[in-house]
Structures are given as C-alpha cells and as structure tokens.
Image: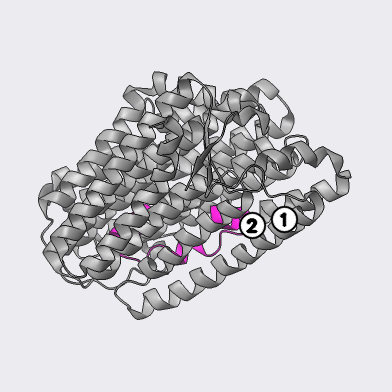
Amino acid sequence: MTPSLLVPLVVGLPLIGAAVTLVAGRRRRLQVGVSIITLTLTFAIAVAMFVIVDAGTPLAVTVAGWPLPFGIVLYVDRLAALLVAVSSVVLLAVLLFSVGQGAADGDDETPVSIFHPSYLILAAGIFDAFIAGDLFNLYVGFEMLLVASYVLITLGSTESRIRTGVVYIVVSLVSSVLFLSAIAVIYGALGTVNMAQIAERMTELPDNVQLVLHLLLLVAFSVKAAVFPLSFWLPDSYPTAPAPVTAVFAGLLTKVGVYALIRTETQLFNDSDVNVLLLVVALATMIVGVLGAVAQAELKRILSFTLVSHVGYMIFGLAIVTEAAIGATIYYMVHHIVVQTTLFLAVGLIERRAGSTSILKVKGLFGAAPVLAALYLIPALNLGGLPPFSGFIGKFALFDAAAQVGTPLMYTLIAGGIVTSLLTLYALMRAWNLSFWREEDDSVETEARIQHLGGAPAAEEVSERRVIPRIMTAATVGMVAISVGLTVFAGPLYEICERIGSALLEPVSLVDLGEVEESS
C-alpha cells in the first residue's frame, strides 16, 4: 500500500464507524468498542502520515479518480497530520469520559444510540476539514461537523439546551452561507476552488477584488473561530451542553476555524495585507474575552470566555506573518486544544462531585476531593501562562516574534497579551480558591467579597451529587498528563511547529503535489 492511500482512511474510518454504531442501535459495548478502535486507528494513521511528510513531501490524493484540478483533493502536510493526531487523542479521551458518564447515569445525558454515530461523524468532519485541499471540501468538512454538533449540543432535550442550540444553529448557518457565497465568488473570479490553484491565480486579480474575496473568507471563518465581535454566540451555547460535548467543542471546533484562517492567510492571500486589521481584532478578542471571564460566577461560562480570549493569541500570531510567529501560533494552538479540553473535563468532575458549577455555591472541595483539586489546578495554571508550563512557552514565543517586528502596535499587542494572561490566571485561581479552599462555615466577610458576582448568569440548576466513575477520572488524568507532556517535550514539539511555520509560508502549487494518487 502506498503512503497516500492512508489519507482517505482518516475520514473513511470514522464514517464507517458511525455507520456501524448506528446499525448497532443500543448495543452499548459494541458502539463503545467501535468508537475507541476507530479513533485509535486514526491516531496511528496520523502519526504514520506525519513521519512520512516530515521526511519528504506532503501526501495528496484525488477522490474517485478525477484528475487535478477538477477532483476533490485530500492534502496532508505536517500541519494537517499534527492536528489530526492531536484531535484524535482529544476525541478519544472525551469519548472515554462520556462512556464513564453514560455507564453511571444511563442515557439521560448522552443517549448511546444517538451519541456515538454523531460523535464519529463530528470526528470525520473535523478530520476532513484538516486535510481538505480545496475550499468546497473544506466546506463539506465544516457541514459534517456542524450537523453532528447540532445533535450533540441538544442531547437531553432540556429547555436551555434547545434554546441555546437554536442560537448555535442559526449562527452556524449564517456562517455557512457566508462561506458558500465566498466559494461561489472565488470560483466565478478564478474558475477554481482548488487551494493551490487559487494561490497561483490570485495575483491576476485587481487588488480591490482580492481584498473583497479575502474579507469574505475572513468573516466566514471568524464566526467559526469565535473571533470578536463575531464570538457573541459561544459563551451561551457551550455551557448548557453535556460535559463531554462541551469539552470537545471547546477544544476542537473553534480551532477548525482558526486552522481555516491559517490556510487562508499563509497560502491563499499571502500577498494581501490585512495584518493591521487582524492585530486590532486580536487585541479586542483577547481583552473582551478575558473581561467577560472575570465577570462570571459559573465555571463553564468562565472557561467559555477564556476560550474566546485565547483565540485572540492565535490571531495575534497569525497577523505577525513571520516563520517564528506562525510556528508559535501552531504550538499555542496545540497547547490550547489540550488544555482547554482538560479544564472542561475537570469542571465536569466538579459538577458531579458538588452538584453545581457555580463558584458561589461550591465550597470545601479540597478536603473532600484533593485529586480533583489537582486536576483543575494544573491546567488552570497552564492556561494562565505560569512558567514553566506550555502556556507560558507559547505566549513567550508569540511575544518574542512580535518584539522582533518592533512596531508600536506590536508592543501594544504584547501588553494586551500580558494583561489577558494575568486576568485569565486571576479568574481561574479565584474560581479554584472559592471552590476548593473556601469552607462551608466561612465568614460573612468572605461572602461579601464575592457579592458583586451575585448578578452573573447562573449555572443550570443541578442539585444531585453523583459518584465519579473511575474511567472519568482516568480520562481527565490522562489529559492532564498530556498537557504536562507539552511542557516536558516542548523542545521537540516546538521544533516541529517551527518546521510547519516555515513550510506554510512557501506557497503550494499543483506541481508541488507531485504524482497525486487516485482513490476510488
């Protein structure tokens, strides 16, 4: 088997797994086994592909035998292989977490007959978006993951989930219409949707036409990435979903949008300068997001706002447009996928142990659950950028790349990034202090210090305290270990990201794809 034949398996395996789990109905063990095997094999394939592309040229394959540039091209370079590998690990960990929750609680939160097929279709959509070689296939990947996410975000059919699900669906459809419209305009202007061919032909268009096409894609992808001011939908949509769904959404869905922005800026419009606009948007995203987090009293909403603010760091790095900055952005993207998912899993454990995710209600967890305290504290310090964690490494690399450019706007962004990091640490540590250190009989003075949070949106009422299954704890421990591994192995990983950054700034042409394999 030639190496290129591995490429379609990345999408094909999850789709086959989704079909099998759908046919299996309520045979829980079979569905769980198929899902675990599927994501494990996907991870192994991604690692194999990365070894291949890191040593040589990218892998490309056309689907159904149509020749370039007319066929659907699946394209795997270092970036795509790395993100598929990281995503499959995250999806597997969250799957194990949901298996433990389902075994303990039944099907109320994640109905097994619906959850597993939808989850694997979500995975297929994410993987397809990462390896898409043309804009229309990227659109298909987005739609696959969005259709699955519509189902997952409304699992349980509670009033709050249906209400926020409707908002999520409307925003996603608007974004999809914008993206599809952009594809139509690009095809009308250039006669192709193949990314390599778009990059070759873009310079033939007048500057004002290039700018319009550029902005159309930027707006469409910015909605998906939750970039300010198009991020209003996220803090209300994610917190109401079941814990494992929220975790995978927070870790991966916005990063697919960021990935699309990376491809757009480095390969399609590398000669079009909207960097100042991106820098301003990045600063606004960081500051507005973290200020929203500081004003929250509910753990999931705090994390949702920090999710928005930290997307700003990635846009910041992307707007610098140097090899060092792109490499730092990729490293920070991997860091954020892992750490944000881990924090949401930890909050899911807190919700089970305390019966709530409101920091106004949760008290005294340190003595009752010290392991849980550590599972929240480690990724919280990491996300806050405390040395020597990967969050600090990624932010320092971004700031260093900006300082090398040395413009006043860059130094303003550095200052904004430092403020955002400090406020993130403040919001997460305040939540940890109140939830874990505060005792049930704390004084009136302690309560008075947090009285200003009384008007913040409340968590969905959860009164029942439930046992935490070992598999849920094990999945969270595994993710914490991976997040620590990003620090321990920061050197080799950062070297990989630097190679990715260097390659992304070299435009891909149809000739560079070499002898493209055909797949039926």
Q: Which residues are magenta?
A: 221-248
Q: Residue at x 19, y 72 (%)?
A: 463
Label 1, residues with CA under 10 Å away: few <14, some 14-19, many ≥20: some
Q: Disc count in the image?
A: 2
Say which mark, if any, is on residue 220.
2
At mark 2, the secondary structure is: helix
Q: Residue at x 66, y 20 (%)?
A: 404
In the rendered image, residue 473, in percent from the top left (x then y), is placed at 17, 48
Residue lying furthest bottom: 159
Quadrant occupied by the N terminus: top left
Label 2, residues with CA under 10 Å away: few <14, some 14-19, many ≥20: many
Per the image, is 246 magenta?
A: yes
Question: Is residue 441 among what the camera can see?
Answer: no
Per the image, is 58 magenta?
A: no
Toward the viewer: 513 or 319? 513
**Image color mode:** one colour
Q: Left or right of 363: which side holds 246? A: right
With respect to residue 172, does 190 lie above or below? above
Toward the viewer: 123 or 254? 123
Q: Quadrant of residue 249?
A: bottom left
In the rendered image, residue 299, in percent from the top left (x then y), is placed at 34, 57
Q: Residue type at mark 1? A: Leu
Q: Residue type at mark 2? A: Ala
Residue at which label 1 appears: 216
In the rendered image, residue 176, in percent from the top left (x then y), is placed at 60, 63
Toward the viewer: 108 or 467? 108
Q: Given contact means CB atoms under 8 Å apart, are the residues at marks 1 and 2 in contact? A: yes
With respect to residue 208, does 298 lie above or below? below
Q: Left or right of 128: which side holds 363? A: left
In the rendered image, residue 280, in percent from the top left (x then y), is placed at 69, 44
Q: CA distance from mark 1 to mark 2?
A: 6 Å
